Image (cartoon, rainbow, N blue to C red):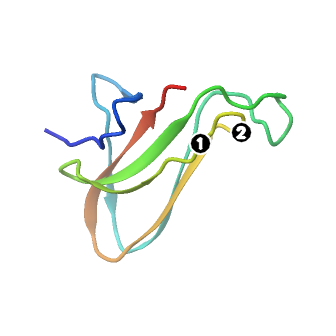
Amino acid sequence: MAIIPDLNGIGSAHDFGSGDVFQNISLTPGNYTIVMQWEDEIYSIMETNSGTLNDLDIYLTYDNGITLFGFNRNNYGGDPLEVLPFNCYAKYNSQYFSYQGIR
């Protein structure tokens, strides 16, 4: 069973389909940037005056679900976007998942 970070029980992991909260990725050595954007209007290009009403976070995990690191910037009132840059130094199978906070 995969381990999802304990974020004080506030929010839930996003279901990518069939109850799976993880997206599997295979990595080779190199620099990576995973960008997650969701369907809300974008504040910085003036599609909205109030910004997103949703806060999603993104985490990179080992293939067993244990978290390597993540970004959990507060998106409320801003853009519906999370960016996860990282370096990989060896061939590796990993996963990432999204966590939706509750305001």
Q: Which mark is residue 74?
A: 1
Percent x, y for residue 94? Answer: 28, 55
Q: CA distance from mark 2 to mark 1?
A: 8 Å
The residue located at (59%, 42%) in the rendering is 74
The residue located at (68%, 30%) in the rendering is 52
Secondary element under disc 2, as helix, strand or loop, is loop
Up/down of 32 relative to 77, above or below: below
- Badge 1, how many Cα within 10 Å: few under 14, some, many 20+? some
Percent x, y for residue 47? Answer: 83, 30
Residue at the left extreme, as displayed = 1
Check disc 1 and give the amino acid type.
Asn
- Badge 2, how many Cα within 10 Å: few under 14, some, many 20+? some
Percent x, y for residue 19? Answer: 27, 24
Check disc 2 and give the amino acid type.
Gly
The answer to whether 60 appears left or right of 2 in the picture is right
Secondary element under disc 1, as helix, strand or loop, is loop
Residue at the top extreme, as displayed = 18
Q: Quadrant of residue 76?
A: top right
Percent x, y for residue 40? Answer: 67, 27
Q: Which residue is mark 2?
A: 78
The residue located at (34%, 30%) in the rendering is 9
Label 2 with label 1: CB-CB less than 8 Å = yes
Up/down of 80 relative to 50, above or below: below
